[in-house]
Image: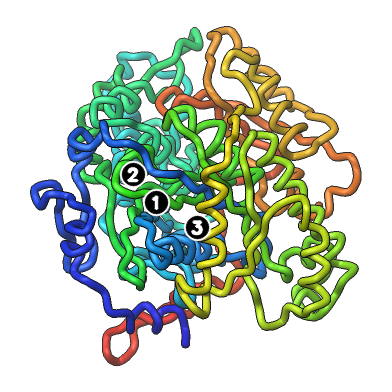
Amino acid sequence: MKDIEIARNAKLKNINEITRRLDIPEEYVEQYGKYKAKISLYYYEQIKKKNNGKLILVTAINPTPLGEGKTTTSIGLCDGLNKIGKKAILALREPSLGPVFGIKGGATGGGYSQVAPMEEINLHFTGDIHAITSANNLLSAMIDNHIFHGNELGIERVVWNRCLDLNDRKLRKVEIGLSNEKNMTSREDHFDITVASEIMAILCLATDIKDLKRRLGNIIIGYDKRENKITAKDLKAEGALTVLLKDAINPNIVQTIENNPAIIHGGPFANIAHGCNSIIATKMALKLGEYVVTEAGFGADLGAEKFLNIKCRKLETFPDAVVIVATLRALKYHGGATKEEASEENLNALEIGIKNLMKHIENIQLFGLNPIVAINKFTTDTEKELQLLKEKLEGKIEYSLLENWAKGGEGAADLANKICRICEKEHTFKNTYELSDTTKDKIEKVAKKIYGASNVEYSEEAEKQIADIEKNNVQVPVCIAKTQYSFSDDDKNLLCDKPFTIHITSAEYKAGAEFIVVKTGKVMTMPGLPKVPSAENIDLDENGNIVGIF
C-alpha cells in the first residue's frame, strides 16, 4: 500500500482530543479543520516553569538518492516511546513545496510511521510558509518603493532578495524595473526559495513576538554610498512584517497515524539554512512531554552541526541522546555502488561506505553527546551485510534495527528502550567553536573538525566580506551553506578518501537571524526542478482525492 493510502486510511482523532491529552486549555488552541490546530505561543508562559523532558535529536548519514528515512525514524521512535508507556511528542519541521513538487516528494514520513493529515501538511498546511513568503516580498516591495519615491535613505546597494516556495532555477538572477515608468530604475535581483529566507530563520529562532519584531527590524536590506548598513527598521517595515507573521509564529499541532502528538513548525533547509524547527515549538514540546523527538535536516555534518552550534545556544539546552539513521543501501552507495548495485549484496562497497557513518558518529561524540545508530531495515539487506555492520559497530556504539516503516511504533520499540537508557547517561556538551572566535576560526573549526577538510580557501569576495564582518566584532554562529551529499563541497566526492579543500565563496552577516551565512562551492539558495519532477505525477482522482504525493 502506498504512503498516501496508508495515511488516508488511518483512524485520526479530532485534534482537540490530542490537545486535551496534553492538558492544553481550549482557549490556547485554534483549530484549522478537524485534524490540525495552532497552539498560542502565549501558552508557553503558563508552562515555562515545568521541568523539561528529555530531548532526542534524530540525524543521519549524508543523504543519497535511495533515501535514509530520517523523518520516518523520528515518527516511528515517537510512536515506539509511546508504545512502551512513555509520554513522547514529536517536534518536526514543515515541508516546503519545492521538494514536494521537485525531486524529494513529501516530508511526512512513510509506511506506518507518518504524520497526518499527510496531504495537507505537505501542501499549504496552516499557511506559515506563505506568510513568510509574503513578509519577505513585502519588504522587497517597500525597498523598491522607497527608492522610487526619492530614496531618502540613500540606498546604493540592495542585498535583500525576493523569495518563492518553489524550485525555479530561472529566478536565481533576474532584472526588475523594466516597465520604463517615470523614476523607475532597473536593477539585478535574485530569488531564494522561501525556506532559505532570513525571515524563515528569524521565525524559527525568535523566542516570542517581541523578539520576532526586534529581529525583523534588524534585517540588513542594503547599504548607502559610505557602506553604512540600512535596516528594515530604517524603512519602518518591522511592524507590518510582524503583523503578517502573527499567526505563523504559533506552533502547529497534528498527530501521527498512531494518534500521538506532533508539533510541526518552521522549515529551513539544512544545506542552505539552519535546518531546525522553531525554538518556540521545541521549548513548548519539552514542557509537554517526557520525551521530545526532533530532527535536523540532511546529514549530521549539516543539520546536526547547526542544531548544536546555532539552535542549542538559543534553546539553552542540548540533546540527551542522538540517533544517527542509515540504511545498508545508502552505505553501499557511499561505498561506490550504483543505485542498482546498492540493492544487491556488496560487502566491499558496504565496508567502504561504513566510513561515512563512522565519521558522523565521531562528530556527535566530539560534541560530548551519546549517539545510537538506527538502521532502517530493507528486504534486500542480507545476513552477511548485517553481520558486517554489527562487527563494525559492536563495542563502539549501540545500534538498533528498525522495522517501523512496516510495523509502526512496534517496529521501533527496541530503539525506544535503548534511547531511554542512553538519556540517563552522563554527557558533557561542548560546541565546535566559541562565539568569541574570529569568523575564519569558526569556519575552519567546522570545516576541519566536522567535515574532515584539510584546508579552507576563500574567494576574493569572501575575504573582503569577512574583513568587513570582523570590523564590527560580530560574535554570532556561522551557518555554512554546503552540498548535503558529501562532507566536502563537491557533491560528487562521496568517499572523501583523499585530502580535500572547502572553498568559501561568500560570507554575509544576517543581523535578524543573528548568524553569518557562509556559502561554499556551487551551493544555490534557489533549487531547480529535476528532469522528471514529482509535479508530473501529482493529481486529483475521480473522487477528488490527491494522488502522487509520496
Please give left or right for residue 210 compared with residue 430 in the image.
left
Residue 89 figure quarter: bottom left
Residue 280's place in the image compared with 70, above or below, is above
Q: Foreground residue, 505 or 326?
A: 326
Q: x, y (%) of residue 158?
A: 45, 26
- Residue 473 in view of the camera: yes
Q: CA distance from mark 1 to mark 3?
A: 25 Å
Q: The residue tagged with tag 2: helix, strand or loop?
A: helix
Q: Dot 1 corresponds to which residue?
A: 91
Instruction: Please report the residue visible at 31 percent of the width from the left and 59 percent of the height from the top.
Output: 261
Q: Answer yes or no: do the residues labelled 1 and 3 have beta carbons within 8 Å?
A: no
**Residue 106: image tag:** none
Instruction: Please report the residue visible at 76 percent of the width from the left and 71 percent of the height from the top.
Output: 386
Which badge, 2 or 3, is on the more N-terminal residue? 3
Q: CA distance from mark 2 to mark 3?
A: 27 Å
Which badge, 2 or 1, is on the more N-terminal residue? 1
Instruction: Please report the residue visible at 14 percent of the width from the left and 53 percent of the height from the top.
Output: 30
Residue type indicated by callout 1: Ala
Q: x, y (%) of residue 269?
A: 51, 48
Residue type indicated by callout 2: Ala
Give the label, 1 or 3, closer to the camera. 1
Please give left or right for residue 1 compared with residue 214 in the image.
right
Q: Residues within 10 Å of mark 1 (few under 14, many from 20)?
A: many
Q: The residue tagged with tag 1: helix, strand or loop?
A: strand
Q: Answer yes or no: do the residues labelled 2 and 3 have beta carbons within 8 Å?
A: no
Instruction: Please report the residue visible at 21 percent of the width from the left and 45 percent of the height from the top.
Output: 247
Q: x, y (%) of residue 186?
A: 43, 34
**Residue 167: image tag:** 3
* Farthest-out residue, left: 27
Residue type indicated by callout 3: Asn
